[in-house]
Image (spheres, rainbow, N blue to C red):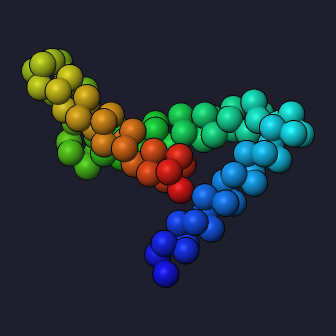
Amino acid sequence: SAASDVYKRQEHKRGLYEELMLDGKMEEHLGEIEQTAQKRMKQIITSLAEKNQITEEMKRENQMSWVQAMNSIKNQAEEMIMSELIYN
């Protein structure tokens, strides 16, 4: 069932947390997650900007619209990363 799957994931995370803390590897693990998240963020932003035709030309011609569009893309990318890397 879905509830038992959630419980199993929580128990796995708890075990991983305890293991990383005891082995003194938590900082290293978090650093790896941060690097992965930053790399993925750049990939997603680039992809979404291309898909939505957010270009350097748009930036020159209408900076406010470009900033709004890029902020929206950044927010979408952050949500995707949180879902992919943090919540799972």
Q: Which residue is farthest right?
A: 23
Give me the residue at 55% from left, 72% from top: 5
Q: Quadrant of residue 26?
A: top right
Q: Is residue 63 above or below residue 20?
A: above
Residue 6 lies left or right of residue 45; in this view the side is right
Give me the residue at 17% from left, 27% from top: 68
Locate residue 84, reporting x and y percent: 49, 53
In-front residue for pair 70/20: 20
Locate residue 61, reporting x and y percent: 11, 20
In-front residue for pair 30/76: 30
Q: Quadrant of residue 65?
A: top left
Residue 35 lies left or right of residue 56; in this view the side is right
Locate residue 33, reporting x and y percent: 63, 40
Residue 7 lies left or right of residue 53; in this view the side is right
Q: Number of marks in the image?
A: 0
Q: Is residue 46 visible?
A: no
Q: Is residue 69 visible?
A: yes
In-front residue for pair 30/1: 1
Give me the residue at 75% from left, 30% from top: 27
Locate residue 23, reporting x and y percent: 89, 39
In-front residue for pair 16/32: 16
